[in-house]
Image (spheres, grey):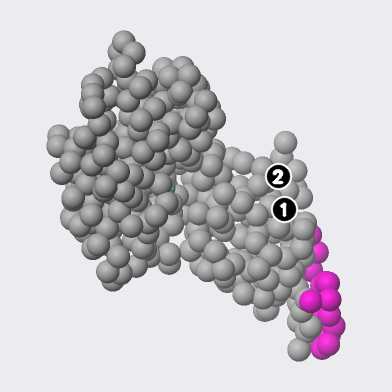
Amino acid sequence: MTSPDRARLTIDLDALACNRAVLAAEAPGAEIAAVVKSDGYGLGAGPVARHLHAEGTRSFFVARVAEGEALRTELAGRDATIYVLDGLVAGTAGRLAAAALTPVIATLAQAKVAMDLSAKPGGLEVALQVDTGMNRQGLSLAESRTLIAAPGYPGNLRIVLIMSHLGSATDPHEARNIEQLARFHEAIALFPGVRTSLAASAGAFLGADYRHDMIRAGISLFGGGPEERPDPRLKAVATLTAPILDIRALQICDRVGYGSGFTADRPMRIALVAAGYTDGIIRAAMGRGQAWVAGALRPLLAVNMDLLVIDLGEGQAEVGDPVELLGPHALLDDVATAAGTVAHEILIRLSTRAERTFVGASI
Ligand SMILES: *Cc1c(COP(=O)(O)O)cnc(C)c1O
């Protein structure tokens, strides 16, 4: 219910569609798949995925089986491939099959299970992740060779996608990108004819060599820049605002909030805002972050559980006015940098206390 003291999270689906178009233009010829793990980066996997589906997205990635099951329900009646990045975790094969989810095989042990399962009538469709130097999920080159040399390979195992993940794509000058690309070429040569995917959002901006058949786009769909700083081509999808509860005057040496907080070094005006770390404003942004109010970005002096204190400066604001904590002025990547984290974490921390509204095209 609309309440004047609540933070508001507005999710702009038109901006989401624009960002998808930016990625498509950046990677011509590649399919733009949508990564909607962690409830669509905290913005709502269902509405986000349905809107992207209407824009032409047919491949989606989640991390957990339960996320895949929920997404399958959200996309009921729509033609969509849902990949589960955790792969074939023991005990989940039945659930993966029931929800028609495609596991992304992440270890050699999982690949062996997949081979066994594929013996049943109808076979088994999987994606395969290869590790090219991130040392997270995926079969090494040696393990990939072991798999293709296994007796009975491929049998009824249908590998529909070979993918890998870049560890340093946000830095286009990192030699690690080139090393991973070279290893990826070695790996995909072992699986001729299978579609390939190396790039997530940042990788899509590394040039033609990194595009392959599919981009697995997450953060850039939601406005996060490929180099962890604002990119003017991408639009803000999430806007978080909260109202001013009070405006107060401080004298020199007045202390604000808890002990570790702020001491006024001049007479100043501060705004008390109805949001806090409960709403996903990272506490570490205290003293470093900024919020947009009265036509300017102004310093965040304190971040408490339910309250923020902002230096109003000369700004003309009134009680009840909205303060933008994230959005088209308080930019996602700047908010993340000030909090010492990445854009992904800022989005997934936006809690459900805020009143959520989706704007833009109908869903
Ligand atoms: C999360 C993830 C992505 C999406 O990454 P972004 O940086 O958000 O675009 C792509 N691929 C894999 C394997 C991931 O884990």
Task: First in sequence, mark 2 or 1: give its number.
Answer: 1
Q: Secondary structure at mark 2?
A: loop
Residue farthest top in this picture = 121
Residue range in magenta is: 243-260
Measured as percent of width and height from the top left, residue 68 is found at: 48, 30
Foreground: disc 2 or disc 1: 1
**Crowd band around label 2 with a 10 angstrom C-alpha radius: few (<14), some (14–19), many (20+):** some
**Crowd band around label 1 with a 10 angstrom C-alpha radius: few (<14), some (14–19), many (20+):** some
Judged left or right of residue 6, residue 254 is right
Determine whether the beta carbon of the residue marked 2 sits less than 8 angstroms from the nearest atom of ligand 1: no
What residue did someone put label 1 on? 278
181 up-or-down from 298: above or below: above
What residue did someone put label 2 on? 353
Judged left or right of residue 97, residue 56 is left
Judged left or right of residue 190, residue 99 is right
What's the residue type where badge 1 is placed? Thr
210 up-or-down from 264: above or below: above
Residue 31's label in the rendered image is: none
> Quick check: can you spot residue 165?
yes
Q: Residue at x 54, y 64 (%)?
A: 341
Q: Residue at x 54, y 30 (%)?
A: 66
Mark 2 vs 1: CB contact within 8 A: yes
Measured as percent of width and height from the top left, residue 273 is found at: 74, 61
Measured as percent of width and height from the top left, residue 332 is found at: 50, 60
Measured as percent of width and height from the top left, residue 278 is found at: 72, 53
The residues bearing labels 2 and 1 have C-alpha atoms spaced at a distance of: 8 Å
